């Protein structure tokens, strides 16, 4: 009987690409991958540590898994395992803790523990994180997350990612093209280009992100690309112009702002001003008027005054992005923000986040409403709910239509008819 392995992935798209690659490695060794809620012999948690809530969520999952699978090998990897390996190792049921430098050794570690019951804990300092775990996701949906870059050199005042992931590094473009060709061979039609600081690609090899985009654009079988996230200071005119001219690169950008106050941006150690950010948005819109823009925002950073927040709110209200990802500030150990004065009360931070959430709902509905009556290309996914199938337009509007099996994992031309619940847009398939 095959040994069973389950995966529990927290956090970013990078983690999902890595978990999927690990799952394929387990399957190659004879394991059967089962659902997260099924009984398993091995339970893998790929952790996140972007906030204290993420740490707590990981601890709760570990305890829940141990209660459900008392004899299972519980293995924890990822950013929380990198930052606090000893803390995780003390939780009952945990047999393996691997920091990010050793994530690719997980299958080997499991085999060691199966043959010689003991606990394995491996981590290292952020300066010693040098390995690149090549990965892409497959089998989960109609798109693949392709990891092109890892680590970050930016060291923003609130962030632990550079401690958890190490310095910025990448594989050569030629190797990443081969990865994309593997994705195409699985039949998937869309790739999301992902990394920790994706636009910083090239630190290891001296290559440029724009050259990677051009090379991926030539991969046969992949019909769509999206860039998962890119810093505004790295979103060059050249990248914008290329994405606007390529039929494969979708009109969809995720660009972190964090604050619309230059005072707060300076304290955060961000590498742009509010004016520079607005300039990038305006450049994108000048070439892609239908673009979907998602923006990250943090509320309640130390010393954020009411005026600072109003500057953020006003900037976002003026720029009219399609979506906001809103994060009340979470103090992380060993970051410069911990020692900053003028802490903002949690109640104030939460109230500001609630105001931005209201703005987000308004902006997203407004964006979706503008699409009604137009035609678009939609990549339909395999999930069927209530007789309907779902997919996304190139500019990331979620669309639903009556289920047709022959259209799954194909790009279909549709007419967008009306706004439904949750801003889904009802579509009619065009011949």
Image (tube, rainbow, N blue to C red):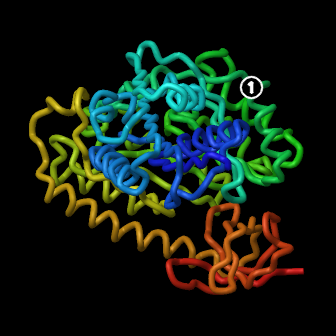
Determine the residue positioned at 39% across, 28% down.
82
Q: 326 or 334: which is nearer to us?
A: 334
Horizontal arrangement in the rendering, residue 211 relative to residue 336 (left or right):
right
Q: Secondary structure at mark 1?
A: helix
Determine the residue positioned at 25% across, 28% down.
335
Residue 272 versus residue 171 in the image, above or below: below
Q: Residue 120, position in %: x, y? A: 42, 25
Residue 43 versus residue 272 in the image, above or below: below
Q: Residue 202, position in %: x, y? A: 63, 22
Q: Which residue is mark 1?
A: 173
Q: 60 or 417: which is nearer to us?
A: 60
- Quadrant of the image occupied by residue 363: bottom left
Residue 315 shows in this picture: no
Residue 2 shows in this picture: yes
Q: Residue 57, position in %: x, y? A: 33, 51
Determine the residue positioned at 67% across, 47% down.
2
Q: Residue 138, position in %: x, y? A: 70, 49
Q: Quadrant of the C terminus?
A: bottom right
Q: 401 or 372: which is nearer to us?
A: 401
Horizontal arrangement in the rendering, residue 251 relative to residue 218 (left or right):
left
Determine the residue positioned at 58% across, 84% down.
419
Residue 196 versus residue 2 in the image, above or below: above
Count of numbered circles in the view: 1
10 Å neighbourhood of mark 1: few (<14), some, or many (≥20)? Answer: many
């Amino acid at each position: 009987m095959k040994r069973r392995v389950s995966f529990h992935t927290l956090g970013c798209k990078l983690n999902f690409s890595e978990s999927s690659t690990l799952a394929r490695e387990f399957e190659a060794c004879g394991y059967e991958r089962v659902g997260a809620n099924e009984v398993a012999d091995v339970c893998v948690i790929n952790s996140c540590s972007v906030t204290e809530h993420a740490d707590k969520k990981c601890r709760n999952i570990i305890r829940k898994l141990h209660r459900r699978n008392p004899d299972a090998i519980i293995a924890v990897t990822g950013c929380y395992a990198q930052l606090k390996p000893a803390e995780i190792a003390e939780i009952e049921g945990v047999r393996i803790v691997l920091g990010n430098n050793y994530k690719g050794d997980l299958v080997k570690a499991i085999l060691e523990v199966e043959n010689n019951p003991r606990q394995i804990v491996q981590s290292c300092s952020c300066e010693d994180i040098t390995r690149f775990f090549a990965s892409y996701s497959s089998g989960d949906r109609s798109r693949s997350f392709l990891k092109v870059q890892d680590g970050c050199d930016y060291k923003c005042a609130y962030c632990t990612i550079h401690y958890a992931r190490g310095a910025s590094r990448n594989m050569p473009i030629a190797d990443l093209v081969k990865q994309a060709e593997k994705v195409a061979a699985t039949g998937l039609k869309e790739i999301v280009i992902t990394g920790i600081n994706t636009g910083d690609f090239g630190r290891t090899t001296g290559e440029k992100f724009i050259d990677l985009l051009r090379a991926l654009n030539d991969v046969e079988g992949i019909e769509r690309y999206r860039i998962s996230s890119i810093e505004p200071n790295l979103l060059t005119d050249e990248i914008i112009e290329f994405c606007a001219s390529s039929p494969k690169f979708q009109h969809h950008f995720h660009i972190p702002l964090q604050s619309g106050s230059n005072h707060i941006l300076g304290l955060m150690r961000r590498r742009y001003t509010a004016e520079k950010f607005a300039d990038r948005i305006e450049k994108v819109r000048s070439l892609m008027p239908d673009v979907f823009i998602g923006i990250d925002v943090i509320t309640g950073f130390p010393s954020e005054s009411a005026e600072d927040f109003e500057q953020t709110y006003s900037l976002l209200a003026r720029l009219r992005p399609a979506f906001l990802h809103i994060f009340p500030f979470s103090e992380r150990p060993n970051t410069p923000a911990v020692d900053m004065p003028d802490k903002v009360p949690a109640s104030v931070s939460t109230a500001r986040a609630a105001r931005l959430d209201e703005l987000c709902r308004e902006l997203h509905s407004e964006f979706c409403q503008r699409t009604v009556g137009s035609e678009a290309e939609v990549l339909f996914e395999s999930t069927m709910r209530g007789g309907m199938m779902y997919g996304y337009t190139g500019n990331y509007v979620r669309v639903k239509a009556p289920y047709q099996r022959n259209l799954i994992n194909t790009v279909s031309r549709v007419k967008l008819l009306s706004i439904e619940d949750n801003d889904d847009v009802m579509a009619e398939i065009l011949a």
